[in-house]
Image (cartoon, coloured by chain):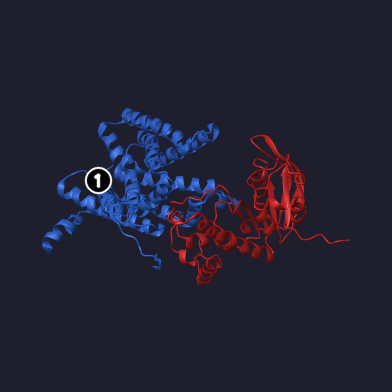
Chain colours: A red, B blue
């Protein structure tokens, strides 16, 4: 008898709707701790809806989300950022806000926090941008700074919606390394991906969303069902082997 | 020379009414500009103006029921301002219309209702006082009230500062933490109403918003950092308050408009000569060479 791997996030017969229209139903499964799970599906399949449901921003019509990670250790990087780029804040200050949820409203940052902030920025290769305003960053630099905030948050559960879209190749490499390290340290990471090559390099497990349902599989099984020559082509739903 | 400076800058404060006016101006200058900075950063610069109108019916009702009683008028103003803010928010949520359109509708209704109420129970002199204030007529009771409200605002703002910053910068991050962004927003709007209520006695309901917004919008030409914006805005407000009072004393002009116009002069000069985003900054052809270390 095999032992069930630990999981801080489980979905039980979940039904989610947007504007009274069911998007996903009967979604049950668990996300393994310390693993990177790719969330794939066509546009409108319900990827963002599922993420909202997991983050508690969308109330389920039925079923439930069981998440044992404390709220201050849950991080979400949405595709459509609500970030106000005109806000007068530097990269270092943005990274430091990651420690705010667990740090409290009144306590000031001490040298230890700033040291950790500098370590996080060095890990992401953005130390030289520490004092640059957010509005003056490129898309890739901004994405690195936002991942820096989640590192500062010491996130146990990290959800990313297409984190590599419109990002340069070097940044993709840096972010992949950081995400793998976070998973190795035990974090549960869920990434919405469209790119097969990125999926092959990053994810171990995959949740495929089609027809309002979710199917759990492994990255290896999914890739075996895909023609190798697809390379970095975007996942085309409807290809045999992906449909549930 | 020293005598002239003393006569212009110090001697006017020998009078009690000028000292009280200066303290009231300083108290408002500490509380109002930080609120203005956050309103500006949230793209809500005109909401302050709308809220200033929203307190008018309450102030007028307080005036009708209790005469020229500052506590009654202030209480009326706070209640009326909060009611209009809640109503505008509710109509916006119910109809799906943007909050600013609901706010615009309610502030016009408020202005008309307030002017009607004051006219029913008082003279045009009373109306002028409510609309434009009279900082030189601030008595000890009013001073205590203004100082108390300003203290409450500064302390509450310090308590919600981080949540407010995160809510302005990235509301989804705050929601992801299970924190109530709408609660922070509600407390902030409540503080705006409180601040305008403190300001109406000195500057009037229509001009109280000036000390909130003008220093904040002016500071944007001088700093790119939040702390810098707040400190510069407070310094500008202090300068405008004291300078406006002295101008009012020496030139025999109304004090409220003198204060706001002085802040306005600061805005225009900064738009022309400021360090960032000004006309001068646009015309300057200068760039830091590659490899230069970045500073704050």
Residue B63, located in which quarter of the rendered image? top left
Foreground: B185 or B43?
B43
Instruction: Name the side, left or right, on which B194 lies relative to A120.
Output: left
Q: Which residue is mark 1?
A: B261
Residue B209, located in which quarter of the rendered image? top left
Residue shown at 68%/59% (left/top)? A201
Residue farthest toward the front in the current orientation of the protein? A229
Instruction: Name the side, left or right, on which A147 lies relative to A226.
Output: left
Q: Chain of mark 1?
A: B
Label 1 packing within 10 angstroms: few (<14), some (14-19), many (20+):
some
Foreground: B15 or B174?
B174
Q: Kindly tell me whether residue A9 is visible in this rendering.
A: no
Image coordinates of residue B197 in percent, x first then y, are: 38, 44
Foreground: A104 or B128?
A104
Image coordinates of residue A50 in percent, x first then y, are: 68, 46
Q: Secondary structure at mark 1?
A: helix
Image coordinates of residue B61 in percent, x first then y, are: 38, 34
Instruction: Name the side, left or right, on which B186 lies relative to A57.
Output: left
Foreground: B238 or B236?
B236
Q: What is the quadrant of the C terminus of chain B in the image?
A: bottom left
Image coordinates of residue A101 in percent, x first then y, are: 57, 59
- Tell me how many marks there are: 1
**Vertical comparison of A119 with B142: above or below:** below
Residue farthest toward the right in the current orientation of the protein? A1
Q: What is the quadrant of the N terminus of chain B in the image?
A: bottom left
Q: Kindly tell me whether residue A6 is visible in this rendering.
A: yes
């Amino acid at each position: 008898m095999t032992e069930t791997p630990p999981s801080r996030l489980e979905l039980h017969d979940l039904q989610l709707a947007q504007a009274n229209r069911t998007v996903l139903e009967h979604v049950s499964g668990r996300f393994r701790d310390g693993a990177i799970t790719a969330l794939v599906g066509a546009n409108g399949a319900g990827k963002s809806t599922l993420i909202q449901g997991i983050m508690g921003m969308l109330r389920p019509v039925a079923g439930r989300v069981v998440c044992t990670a404390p709220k201050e250790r849950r991080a979400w990087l949405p595709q459509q950022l609500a970030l106000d780029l005109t806000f007068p804040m530097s990269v270092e200050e943005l990274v430091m806000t990651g420690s705010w949820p667990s740090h409290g409203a009144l306590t000031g940052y001490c040298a230890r926090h700033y040291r950790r902030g500098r370590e996080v920025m060095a890990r992401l290769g953005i130390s030289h941008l520490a004092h640059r305003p957010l509005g003056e960053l490129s898309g890739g630099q901004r994405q690195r700074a936002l991942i820096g905030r989640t590192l500062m948050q010491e996130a146990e559960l990290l959800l990313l919606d297409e984190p590599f879209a419109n990002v340069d190749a070097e940044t993709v490499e840096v972010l992949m390394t950081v995400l793998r390290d976070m998973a190795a340290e035990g974090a549960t990471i869920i990434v919405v991906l469209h790119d097969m090559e990125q999926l092959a390099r990053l994810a171990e497990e995959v949740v495929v969303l089609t027809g309002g349902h979710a199917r759990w599989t492994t990255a290896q099984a999914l890739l075996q069902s895909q023609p190798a020559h697809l390379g970095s082509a975007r996942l085309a739903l409807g290809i045999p082997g992906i449909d549930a | 020379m020293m005598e002239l400076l003393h006569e212009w800058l110090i001697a006017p404060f020998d009078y009690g009414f000028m000292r009280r006016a200066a303290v009231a101006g300083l108290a408002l200058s500490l509380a109002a500009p930080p609120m203005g900075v956050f309103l500006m950063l949230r793209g809500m610069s005109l909401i302050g103006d709308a809220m200033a109108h929203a307190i008018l019916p309450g102030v007028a009702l307080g005036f009708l029921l209790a005469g020229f009683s500052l506590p009654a008028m202030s209480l009326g103003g706070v209640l009326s301002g909060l009611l209009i803010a809640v109503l505008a928010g509710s109509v916006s949520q119910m109809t799906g219309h943007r909050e600013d359109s609901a706010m615009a509708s309610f502030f016009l209704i408020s202005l008309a209702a307030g002017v009607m109420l004051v006219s029913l129970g008082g003279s045009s002199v009373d109306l002028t006082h409510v609309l434009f204030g009279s900082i030189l007529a601030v008595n000890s009771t009013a001073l205590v009230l203004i100082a108390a409200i300003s203290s409450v605002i500064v302390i509450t703002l310090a308590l919600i500062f981080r949540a407010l910053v995160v809510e302005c910068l990235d509301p989804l991050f705050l929601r992801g933490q299970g924190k109530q962004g709408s609660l922070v927003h509600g407390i902030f709007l409540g503080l705006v109403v409180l601040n305008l209520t403190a300001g109406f006695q000195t500057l009037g309901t229509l001009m109280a918003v000036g000390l909130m917004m003008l220093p904040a919008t002016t500071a944007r030409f001088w700093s790119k950092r939040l702390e810098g914006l707040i400190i510069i805005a407070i310094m500008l407000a202090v300068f405008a308050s004291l300078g406006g009072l002295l101008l009012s004393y020496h030139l025999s002009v109304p004090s409220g408009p003198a204060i706001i116009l002085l802040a306005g002069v600061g805005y225009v000069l900064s738009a022309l000569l400021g360090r960032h985003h000004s006309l001068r900054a646009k015309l300057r052809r200068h760039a830091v060479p590659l490899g230069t270390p970045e500073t704050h």
